Image (cartoon, helix red, strand yellow):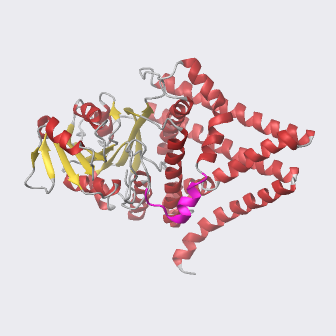
Amino acid sequence: MPNSWKTAARFFVIVGALGLVVIYSMAALWRRDPAVLFWTTLLYFSYELGINVLLVTAAWFGLRARRWASTVPATALRPELAVLIAAHNERTCIFDTLESVFAQEGVAEVIVASDGSTDGMNEALVERFALRPDPAVEHAWRGGSGERLLLLALPKLGKGGVLNAALAQTTSGVAATLDADTRLAPHALAALADAFRDPAVASAGGFVYVRNAARGPWLVRYQYWEYVKNFMWRIGLAHLGVCLQVSGAFGAFRTRILRGIGGFSGHSLVEDYEVIYRLHEHMRLAGENYCVEVVPDAVAYTDSPDTVPSFVHQRTRWFAGFLQTLWEYRRMVGNPRMGLVGTLMLPIKCVDAILPVWGSLSLAVLLAATLHGSAAWERAGLFLFLARWVVDLALSGVMWNWHRRLFPDRGHVLPGAVLAAHMATEGIIFNWFRQIAVLNAYSWFVRRVRKWHQPRWGVASTTPGSG
């Protein structure tokens, strides 16, 4: 058997087995077979709860290790840092973002890579910062605060393409990516750069909070809590050496390593997610000592989708990009050369690949049990639902308590009672809605969709991976 087939076989075995479980369960739902449906739903709930327990436990060990870890010697120099901002028609928000960047210490360069902007953003930047044409770089203007701002007025290349154009221009040791609508908290970039005093750090991500939760609708408030949990979990995943995501909204890479692995993908729907897979694979195969870190003191704030259509579109793109990335790197699944990334994290991701279908099926089972089932079936469905809700709520309470104690200076966007209400109803409302919202991603994956629409832009992107 060719080696490529051997590596792919692990992927097909995991996903195929789970697919058969889902198909068999759907047939049982059609036949109204309560025994099969009960055990299928129990298996789904057990998996989700098991993963949540694993993430919370990993976060505890990660936070504990962070508390007792020795700091990097003061003699280790903080590397110079460049901020790379990919922007397409971001005139309404980019000036607030740049204001927060220029207020930071330790920023050597700020490169705005304009991805075929047509809303007057380029002209406004030139005027506001008195930029001058750079004779050394085509279609570039330089100036701004301390001559640190470089504007690249590029044709439409997509987000990965313009980030690579910006990467080619930087001379700094660390390249941080920042979304054009994301504002930085004070000292955020210094904290992020400090992580790279450790020569083993290849990439590091900050904490991104949802800033429009207080004034936003129910959907945004759920996303606020979701973001807090996810970034707390990443502390644990980084501690285990299996962190697979550094948010493109606010993350950083050692420049030589990012260039060495080819920069960002020009064809991925989630270029920030795909590049971490590639980084893990490259560094593992090269036998290099490295880590992907999380820096809780590097804080940024962004807006999240506040309407159902924009949320569904964003999550469809994210999940379709996840499926594309998992398929592209299926050779890593179960591969012992990839360490825990290959033997632990990626098998879990294979299960996650069918989770929306499995979860939607379980919701259908619960509804069927409640509306049309026998008394025994109703009791079983209610028991499963309540058991999951109680454990989820307990784990959420633990995570929020850790966050509140570790970061007491963080202004909590939501009042305590409002946040508690959303934590208590997350498992009843948001978790199910989130599973259903991404079902169209399978169609995107099969059709190999490579274009997407950013709601605040007002126009659809027509280039792979743009945004």
Question: Which residue is nearer to you in this view: 8 or 370?
Answer: 370
In the image: residue 214, left or right of residue 28: left
Question: Which residue is nearer to you in this view: 362 or 258?
Answer: 362
Residue 55 visible (yes or no): yes
x then y, percent, for residue 188: 32, 32
Above or below, 239 relative to 440: above
Residue furthest bottom as drawn: 1
Q: Report the residue at 67% width, 53% height from top.
A: 357
In the image: residue 388, left or right of residue 431: right
Above or below, 95 relative to 278: above
x then y, percent, for residue 413: 47, 23
The verdict on residue 450 being magenta is yes
In the image: residue 149, left or right of residue 22: left
The image quarter containing residue 79 is top left
x then y, percent, for residue 320: 52, 56
Q: Which residues are magenta?
A: 439-451
Residue furthest left as drawn: 135
Q: Report the residue at 53% width, 65% height from top.
A: 447
Q: Report the residue at 78% width, 51% height from top.
A: 40
The image quarter containing residue 18 is bottom right
